[in-house]
């Protein structure tokens, strides 16, 4: 009875007093984007803004950096939204800010421990850094080539960070992606995060961008792709992929090659592919793919394993460019066009497989197919799969049903 009374008393205190460790929302610094670059040098602002007050300020804080051990290895930039500068009118009715008013604050901190850098940022703002609404983690290609294991531990352990946070690889400085001032969005982090949704209609974008998925692949020793981003002053392009062997980036591939990987792995969500139009010089025809189904079958032979890849496509003949649209689209033409698309897609897949085999990174995850369908054979080769994969034979068959 005494224990029950004690529990009821505690509950009553909680109900009456509220959460003792709660933090008011206006006291939080909502970090919505993180960029990780190599140090030195400290990342610079956009080229058109060299020697700006912001860059001078960051250099001053760089010289004031005090860390517990070793020399700084990384520069972490966080993006904080300046809520009162948002385009949404505030409750006082003041309305939108003046054009050119900064809507975000990018703070760069250098160090060799990410939790230490995060806590050091709290010395430069009156708000408490909070990662619960983090949208993107952007990592420079220089860092990615040295390995993600070196930098992800803090983000894996932080209880605030969501596994659905998107992760991108930047060509060049990652900070420059945060510096982008979008035309149609207040914050570059949200702008970049939401581009990933367009993978449903553009097959040249990597569809798996979640931080949690990348961590799972690393822990399971699976090779994988992450999206590559290119940035200008007011625009970010999310196209192409970074090839990871283990946790290290070993190469980049084009959007067309990303498309082939998605076809082979049966991850195609939607998109358009083109081919040369028959009997019409210098012309192009487009196939809008409605449905794509791929079956990968491992076949054990005396000299190894061959993967039979059957790709079945249903789609619409959606455009002919640089050729008269009055041309008769009859059954014979559609059959001929289907064959052209089949040959084009097969060539695209074969060339992509050969290129990625040269990198030794099994982003097609043939090893997972082999493990699932030929477990006894997999047990014999699993310890030397990275040596076997570059020489694995494949047979690609494509069938296009065109309407």
Image (spheres, helix red, strand yellow):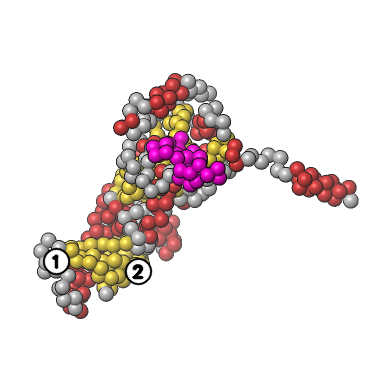
In the image, residue 370 lies at what x, y percent?
Answer: 40, 60
Q: Which mark is residue 63?
A: none
Query: Could you tell me which residue is drawn at 45 percent across and 31 percent down?
Result: 108
Q: Residues within 10 Å of mark 1 (few under 14, many from 20)?
A: some
Q: Is residue 103 magenta?
A: yes
Q: Residue 291 carries which label?
A: 2
Quadrant (top left/top right/bottom left/bottom right) for the C terminus: bottom left
Total numbered badges shown on the rendered structure:
2
Secondary element at tag 1: loop
Observer-nearest of 337 and 124? 124
- Residue 269 vs 82, above or below: the answer is below
In the image, residue 215 lies at what x, y percent?
Answer: 47, 47
Give the dominant element type of the magenta stretch: helix, strand or loop. loop
- Residue 186 vs 105, above or below: the answer is below
Query: Could you tell me which residue is drawn at 68 percent across and 39 percent down?
Result: 21
Q: Does the magenta stretch include residue 63?
A: no
Left or right position of 178 against 16: left
Observer-nearest of 288 and 367? 288
Please provide the residue range marked out in magenta: 81-105
Residue at the bottom extreme?
Answer: 331
Left or right position of 212 against 341: right
How far apart are labels 1 and 2 at the CA level?
A: 27 Å
Residue on which disc 1 sits:
323
Query: Could you tell me which residue is drawn at 34 percent across and 49 percent down?
Result: 238
Left or right position of 228 against 372: left
> Can residue 29 be spotted in the picture?
yes
In primary-sequence order, the first of circles 1 and 2 is 2
């Amino acid at each position: 009875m005494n224990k029950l009374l004690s529990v009821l008393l505690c509950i009553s205190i909680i109900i009456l007093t509220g959460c003792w460790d709660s933090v008011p929302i206006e006291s939080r610094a909502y970090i919505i984007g993180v960029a990780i670059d190599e140090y030195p040098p400290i990342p610079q602002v956009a080229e058109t803004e060299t020697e700006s007050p912001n860059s001078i300020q960051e250099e001053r804080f760089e010289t004031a950096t005090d860390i517990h051990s070793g020399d700084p290895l990384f520069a972490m930039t966080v993006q904080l939204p300046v809520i009162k500068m948002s385009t949404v009118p505030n409750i006082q009715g003041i309305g939108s800010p003046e054009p050119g008013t900064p809507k975000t604050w990018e703070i760069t901190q250098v160090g060799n421990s990410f939790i230490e850098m995060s806590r050091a940022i709290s010395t430069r703002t009156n708000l408490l850094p909070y990662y619960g609404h983090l949208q993107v983690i952007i990592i420079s290609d220089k860092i990615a080539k040295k390995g993600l294991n070196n930098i992800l531990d803090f983000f894996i352990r932080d209880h605030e960070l969501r596994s659905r946070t998107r992760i991108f690889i930047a060509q060049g400085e990652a900070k420059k992606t945060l510096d982008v001032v979008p035309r149609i969005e207040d914050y570059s982090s949200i702008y970049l995060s939401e581009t990933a949704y367009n993978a449903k209609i553009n097959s040249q974008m990597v569809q798996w961008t979640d931080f949690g998925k990348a961590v799972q692949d690393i822990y399971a020793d699976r090779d994988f792709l992450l999206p590559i981003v290119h940035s200008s002053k007011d625009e970010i392009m999310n196209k192409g992929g970074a090839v990871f062997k283990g946790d290290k980036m070993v190469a980049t591939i084009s959007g067309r090659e990303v498309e082939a990987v998605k076809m082979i792995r049966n991850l195609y969500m939607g998109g358009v592919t083109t081919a040369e139009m028959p009997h019409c010089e210098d012309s192009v025809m487009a196939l809008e793919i409605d449905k794509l189904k791929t079956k990968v079958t491992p076949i054990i032979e005396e000299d190894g394993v061959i993967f039979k890849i059957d790709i079945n496509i249903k789609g619409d003949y959606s455009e002919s460019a640089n050729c008269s649209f009055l041309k008769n689209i009859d059954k014979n033409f559609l059959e001929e066009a289907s064959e052209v698309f089949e040959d084009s897609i097969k060539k695209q897949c074969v060339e992509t497989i050969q290129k990625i085999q040269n990198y030794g990174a099994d982003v097609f995850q043939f090893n997972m197919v082999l493990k699932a369908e030929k477990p006894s054979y997999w047990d014999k080769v699993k310890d030397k799969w990275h040596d076997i994969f570059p020489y694995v034979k494949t047979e690609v068959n494509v069938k296009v049903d065109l309407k």
